Image: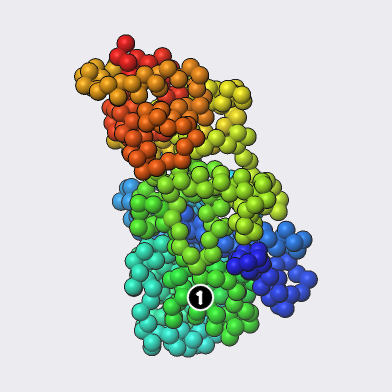
Amino acid sequence: MTSSVESDWVSRFADEVIAEADRRAPGKPIVCASGLSPSGPIHLGNLREVMTPHLVADEIRRRGRECVHIISWDDYDRYRKVPAGIDEAWAEHIGKPLTAVPAPPGSAFPNWAEHYKAAMIDSLAELGVVFRGISQTSMYTSGAYRDQILLAMRQRAKIDEILGRYRTKAPVSKRETDEAAAEAAEGSGAASEDDGGSATGYYPYKPYCTACNKDLTTVTAYDDETTEMSFTCGACGHSETVLLKDFNHGKLVWKVDWPMRWSYEGVVFEPSGVDHSSPGSSFVVGGQIVKEVFDGEQPIGPMYAFVGIVGMAKMSSSKGGVPTPADAMRIMEAPLLRWLYARRRPNQSFKVAFDQEIQRLYDEWDSLAAKAAAGTAPPADAIAYDRARRTAEIELPVTPRPLPYRMLASVADITTGEPTQMLRILHEIDPARPIESLDEVRPRLDKATAWATGQLPVDQRTRVLDKPDLELLDSLGADQRRSLDLLLAGLGEHWSLEGLTTLVYGVPKQMLGLPMDVKPTAELKAVQRTFFVLLYRLLVGKETGPRLPTLLLATGADRVRVLLSGS
């Protein structure tokens, strides 16, 4: 790839969307769409459903075109099962709309859907995502879709015929062959919902029972002229006949609902997960239904790959402990999380790091920032960096003094996040530009502290020894003692992060009689490694630990002298 046009996937999609929108509805605002189900925690895999159209819509707005990104909250979907960690008493609500289910215990929100929507809305605000939310509960119960529902019921034979084209093929879907895909799709409107067929005939509308409020209902008769509809409830036995033209207590089945919304909202761009790529999937069938029933067009948009986290094979909104955007932004700044989604094409899978890999990721981010500032970053990388840091409307907050994340994490680890001690250490890192307030290194310091104190395994935490290891000190040979003496003699002159880095790497060079600017050799690296292990053993009682310059600063000169000399 040799140019930003060729290598920036967001720009390519924006070009296509603008051209398609001008063909379909010239002069009208361009509509990009996402759909989210607040059936449980909305996780980092679901976030791709939002970030892909967000980035495209943002690029369109940057070009001066009017573009709206809608997020349909599928809060009128049925409550399917009780997630891990929730009282099994909630099983009595299975089959009800998500907005009719009580919120989890202790929640301040009025219902289940609002509880999980709120967390995502807060995260999207932090990420700079501008959108128009649409509650499907509000749309259905207000009668907004009345004409579309009546049309679908009149065209039920046509819809059944379209669905039948795929039923007979009995394809092996992604959900049957890819467990990770199935878990990530779970909780969306596409998951495990019937298509409207029953022993009494095909009806694309599913009423919620007016007695028990569950969707375990069967439509038994419908009259096109009067819109009289009869149904029975398999949960409580209630039977009722209503006029559908006045009835607002039900919804279209998913495979009809989704294409109906494409037509209703005029959606031009909407991505879909890999579980929608197989024959008979909601996206494929929806393309036929929107055209043949609703006289609309299917959105363009990519199939997106799933997102995992380092150390976890899959994510499911039905299981406890699933990482959400809020979880990620407890340990990383919002621009970095945006960058993870911006730099990969939608069909490329990636993982979000919650382990030590986050330190390498931050090193990569800081290196890119330096190249972008110097104008030396490759075009596509520079564009992805810019998309991560700002939108058409805002610039995201950044840390004024972005010190290396791994160093801040080490400082937080060694001090267990105690602010006074952290400021003491950070103040000494660069004597020419001392840190005077922790606010200078926030919010990155807070993220690194949350990672060090919440994600770093206990056996990897750093604890500086309370007293010198006299037995180890007594066992040292003459060369080992001399190396420690050289280090101790240089502490005063080199007491800064840069100075201590020079010192700890320089002592082995002195021991070998080499100049300080010599290039590393295999022999030198071996001697340096042996020296580092000795320092770790004397300082923390282990053979590894945080980077030594940071560890020495954190320990303090006086305590270092005691631990390395024994007195």
Query: Where does the C terminus fall, quadrant-wise?
Result: top left
* Residue 182 point in image, percent of width and height: 38, 66
Q: Is residue 500 left or right of residue 375?
A: left
Q: Name the residue nearer the viewer: 538 or 249.
A: 538
Q: Residues within 10 Å of mark 1 (few under 14, many from 20)?
A: many
At x 56%, y 44%, the residue is 366
* Residue 31 point in image, percent of width and height: 66, 67
* Residue 529 point in image, percent of width and height: 34, 36
- Residue 66: which quarter of the image? bottom right
Q: Secondary structure beneath disc 1?
A: helix
* Residue 522 point in image, percent of width and height: 36, 43
Residue type of the residue flagged with mark 1:
Phe
At x 37%, y 58%, the residue is 314
At x 37%, y 71%, the residue is 175
Answer above or below: position of 316 versus 246: above
Q: Name the residue nearer the viewer: 9 or 248.
A: 9
The number of callouts visible is 1
Q: Is residue 337 left or right of residue 101?
A: right
